[in-house]
Image: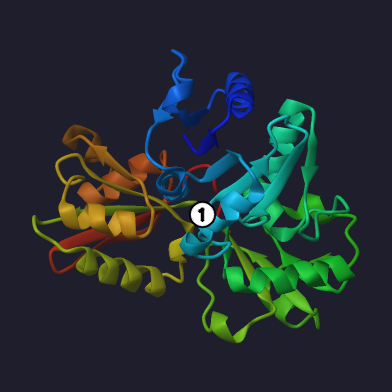
Amino acid sequence: MSLAMVAITDAGARLARQIAARTGDCVFYLPERLWEGDGGHYFEMPLAELLPELFRRHRELLCILPAGVVVRLLAPHLRGNSLDPAVVVMDEAGNFAVSLLAGRLGGANELARKMAGITGGRAVITTAPGVDGQTSWDQAARQTALVVEPPANLRDLNDKLARGEKIALVDRRGRIAHHFIETPGVERAETFSAALNSGAAGMVFVTHRLVPNLDRLPNLLLLRPRDLVLGIGCEPGVSAGEFERAVAWELERAFLALASVACIASAADRVEEPGLRDFARRFDLPVEGHETPALAAGEGDCEGAAILSSRGGRLLVAKKKHGRIVLAIALKNDSNGE
């Protein structure tokens, strides 16, 4: 479950239980002294230990606690908006849901609105754009399950959006363009080349294609669809580093972005290989295993696994061998490319 709630008082516990009953897909943590047979998690450890642990384990965190307490306990554990989970603070009466950490990129603004909608309270959003109802680039990305790259360029592109500066948007599949039809300054471009030559102050590309020299383009934001599947086969004992080098080599050769990889697919007897699991954890990628008879869909385990996990998608990279590793790359069937 992505959302965890924590409270320490009687009133806070009542509110947490009410929210849990309305949302369903969440878990709440309360002190042992407030135990009820309601499926909640009850703790005896100090809050100073529990809260950082929940911060590490969950993607969304609702704290029915004083904001100052949350700030002091989480401050040593902050890594940045692109890495931290969404944190919202709410008072015991549910009157205010304050977007505290990772407001735009992490989704705390949306979580605050959702929680306020449940309690009948008010969402407190201090980031911009968004305060005037305008959709920001990261909000559009989250609604369409796109990955923002690089996060460092997001603020500048959002600022340009808020000021109405000219921004060239390349979105061939129309994933987010509908959000910006009437937004001043945003103009559609059919190709990357057209956008680069448009004289726009900023550019936003929705693509799984690799863009070289990204560090030299501070006015460019990439929104990555998660539409690629890595089919991987290996001998026993391959290290995570070997997997990383092989994957990076093939992605670069095919001009494909690692951020667009949705999952790893392999034969069922290989998915528990320690090196493969370590590589998957390093890049937060799920691993899907397929039984041998089903792999007849491709010429080899890696191709067949990629096709199965892409739900019958087409191969972009046919089977390649890298030492003790073979891999293939497929495009998910619900995607038509960039």
Horizontal and vertical percent position of residue 201: 79, 80
Count of numbered badges drawn on the protein: 1
Horizontally, is 167 left or right of 262 in the view?
A: right
* Residue 175 in sight: no
Q: Residue furthest top?
A: 37
Identify the amino acid type marked 1. Answer: Leu
Give the residue pinned by disc 1.
Answer: 73
At 73% from the left edge and 74% from the top edge, which residue is drawn? 156
Q: Going by the image, does 268 lie left or right of 255?
A: left
Look at the picture and state if 306 lies above or below 268.
below
Which colour scheme appears in the figure? rainbow
Mark 1: secondary structure: helix
Q: Left of 48 or right of it: where is 197?
A: right
Q: Measuring 42% from the left and 38% from the top, which residue is drawn there?
A: 311
Location of residue 187 (image quadrant): bottom right
**Closer to us: 138 or 7:** 7
Residue 323 percent location from the top left of the image: 14, 69
The residue at the point 75 percent across, 76 percent down is 202
Left or right: residue 298 compared with residue 236: right
Q: At 86% from the left edge and 50% from the top edge, which residue is drawn? A: 133
Query: Split into 4 quadrants, where in the image is the C terminus?
Result: bottom right
